[in-house]
Amino acid sequence: MTLPLVSVICLCYNHERFIAEALDSVLAQTYPNLEIIIVDDCSTDNSVALIEAYCRKHPQLRFISTGHNRGNCAAFNMGFRASSGAFLIDFATDDVLLPDRIEKQVAAFTTVSADYGVVYSDAEYIDDDSRHLGYHCQRDAQGNVTSFAPSGDIFSYLVARYFICPPTMFIRREVLEELNGYDETLAYEDFDFWVRSSRHYKYYFLDEVTTKRRVHAHAMSRGWYRRGNRLLGSTVKVCEKAMALVQTPEEEAALAQRLQYEARQAYFTGNFTEAEILLNMLQLLQPLPPLYRVLRLFNKYKINLSSVRHIYYRLKYKR
């Protein structure tokens, strides 16, 4: 039986410190039928020289440069459109694949129906020095997953909250073709991909640790709600897309949960314009709860309570 081709789209931007470990982990996969495409988004460090050295040593690797810095979504799309695999992995070259990841995820797809578009899994978190930090999923003493990790039609869950570790996703090609890849107008891809793909495809949770995700000391997500950044603006755009996709009262309630969370975060970080847009969307779904009527009033007059958020996070996370 011919094994399906799997395309690993390796995305690099200034990953010279980590790229050798990342590429070695792809080359060490136990699954044999791989297409490995490295896309560098115009790194300013020594990444390209390292990639070129790997390509000379491993001729099966393909290297694409974006030409100028385009961002993660556009870089992935370049790799996706140059690929031909039946399944794809969006792989950042600061992360690490465990050796049997692809083998296990291909096998998982053989156990589910064709309307399943994504397999996701547990992950280990590591620091810049590859030291263990923890795991994405919480487990009991017997090793059973106790955190939220559903399978099936999970559109409403994905609209409401974050629970998937993005680099663990293993994607059926048809899903990306139907979506026309990632939305290149956005600063990040995962929330938008989840919302659009889960409207039409089911997800399957594979109860395995397949990936090591690197948590940097200065991760992009730590500045998520920094005033005026593109990340929050992208979140607002995805919420607007979700508004057009929800169909049932349960899905509307899920979106309302998301909007409440994002509106709070936007307000307490001084992103008053985004907070107003999110509150307006929330009001289209349901009458504003009392707390959010007060929040809207404070937001209207730009009463800055960001210090409250800082105190809360210092107490909760000891930082």
Image: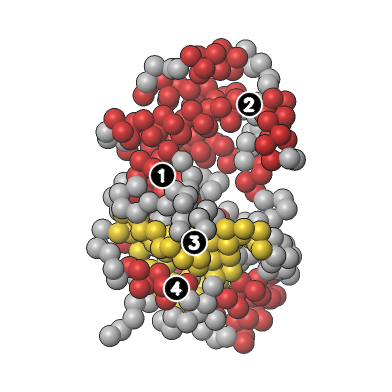
Q: Quadrant of residue 230?
A: top right
Residue 72 visible in image: yes
Q: Amino acid at mark 2?
A: Phe
Q: Earlier in the sequence, mark 3 or mark 1?
A: 3
For label 1, the SS is helix
On-image quarter of the N terminus: bottom left
How packed mark 3 is, by other alpha carbons closer than 10 Å (few <14, some 14-19, many 20 or more), is few
Q: Amino acid at mark 3?
A: Gly
Residue at horizontal 27 percent and vertical 35 percent from the top: 247
Measure how far apart labels 3 and 1 are at the Cα level: 25 Å
Q: Earlier in the sequence, mark 3 or mark 4?
A: 4
Residue 197 visible in image: no
**What residue is disc 4 on?**
102
State left or right for residue 73 relative to residue 86: right
Residue 146, x across and y down, in percent: 46, 51
Tell me whether the residue at label 4 lies in contact with that at label 2, contact meaning CB atoms closer than 8 angstroms.
no
